[in-house]
Image (spheres, rainbow, N blue to C red):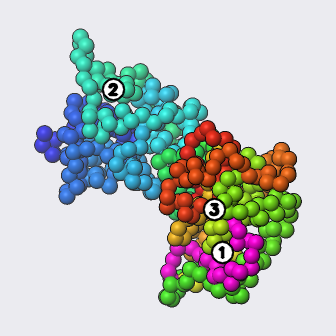
Amino acid sequence: MEINTKLIWNGNYPDPYESGFNIFSKILQFNLIRPKTLAPLISKPGKITYHINFWIGDWIDFNKFSEIIGVDQICLKRGFLDQLGFLTPNKYASNTSNIRQCQECLKYGYHCIFFELPFITHCPWHLTKLTNGCHQCVETIYNKGLTTISKHDHLERFSYCKHIRFVGDEPLFSNMFSDLQRDEIKSFCDDFLQWWVKVHENKMIAEFLSKNSYGLHTSSKLQKFLNAAENLAGECPWFIDHPRQKVRNHKWVYKPKDVLPFPYHVRRGSNIDAIYRSLKRFIFKKYLKPHKKCWNELSNISYEKAQLLDSKKSCTVALAYASWRLSIEEFINIEVFKSNRFSDKELQIFSIPSNFHIPSSAEISSLMYGYFFYIWDEINFGAKHSRFCIIKDQPNFNFSKFAIGNDGYEWQILIPDPKKLIFKSLQICSKTVKFKNWMYTDLISLEEQKFRVSEGESTRTLFRLESNVIGKEYLVIMI
């Protein structure tokens, strides 16, 4: 097939914001060709490929693409996330993200490009839940092509999973959208895109929401970032079936300066040490005082017993406070709290990842303060599991887990709602009979535990907790 050959195309398509995946599936059907034939026809010079990457369009020569099917470039570009200004993770580039469908849209042979943003859960105009991702759909358009069967007076072409299915020249069950339906889809998508443009003002929020998927451990972060996105851009115009976790924001602004890298540690007696001691007093008085008995118990145990704690009885706020202090003071062994011998040890400096600025007091205090709530929230999450361990990250903690920046100048920390954290901690403590060593469990020996955490992590483990000997590997909380 010559490069200047026109391909067969139905002038009624594409529908508004129809995905590249859907456009390519129709081209393969109408022209009875395979991906390895189509891809070179529309590839940019120097980027010739024989696979169809349908989420991003950086490899496509849109002039050629527009000419061979007779569709305006603007309409075509709306089918690719990167052409719409979305940050596209590596998995999109390698086509390992699966296809999610609205079953009602599928009846019309339609698939919207925004359905593949992982935080989108429902079709906005049908309000139906999107299906789980299908990898067979991906493989069909990426390299395999459609399977063809001849039936009497027509050809039937389909993917192995049957999500893509054509009879003759049209998708099976295709009724074609009416003009009113197309206008509705375009209106919904235009509103969503305008909302996203505002969200994109903070690239760290946009980057996280553009992830391919969210695991169980990142669900809490997703709830915070959705809240932050809606604080920035207003309520999302599409229904999203994810809870929003109320957060408090601490903001500060800094201007980079041409200075030598700031040290990662600071001596005691400095202004930063004064900030740290002030935060220690405030946090203890505000959040630890009602759990003073828990703190007295935890701060006086041995390091060995700190590796044998009961995950259902240990006080999460006391654990958070101990982990926060150990991390900042750069200790692993909780027994240091019993002695003043190490009171002159340097503190770890908390600052955003840049070598060209001197961190301000607002930055350091905000990060230190937010770090405590981040740890507390993570430990509350860990307490839902039968086994978890708290490990000191090395060499320096990744603050993007709770601190977000806008072009490096305006930063904010997302603090989980303290009332929610307090309630979860009280739920554990109120059910616990507090006698000596109540946080400690002898269900399993320390020697047995060593085989469940890697050797490198074992040397940085602050606490290990479990409630029984039957269960999975440890959930690892890195702080």
Counting residues from the N terminus, which is met first, the one under dot 2 or under dot 3? 2
**Main secondary structure of the magenta stretch:** loop
Residue 170 is covered by the magenta coloring: no
Counting residues from the N terminus, which is met first, the one under dot 3 or under dot 1? 1
- Above or below, 183 against 351 in this view is above
Residue name at image x 58 percent, y 52 percent: 447
Q: CA distance from mark 2 to mark 1?
A: 57 Å
Report the side of 473 relative to 164 (left or right).
Answer: right
Image x and y of residue 311, in percent: 70, 48
Report the residue marked by disc 2.
160
Local secondary structure at mark 1: helix
Image x and y of residue 155, in percent: 25, 19
For badge 2, the amino acid type reads Tyr
Report the residue marked by disc 3.
462
- Above or below, 400 against 83 in this view is below
Image x and y of residue 421, in percent: 76, 54
Image x and y of residue 397, in percent: 56, 67
- Quarter of the rendering occupied by the N terminus: top left
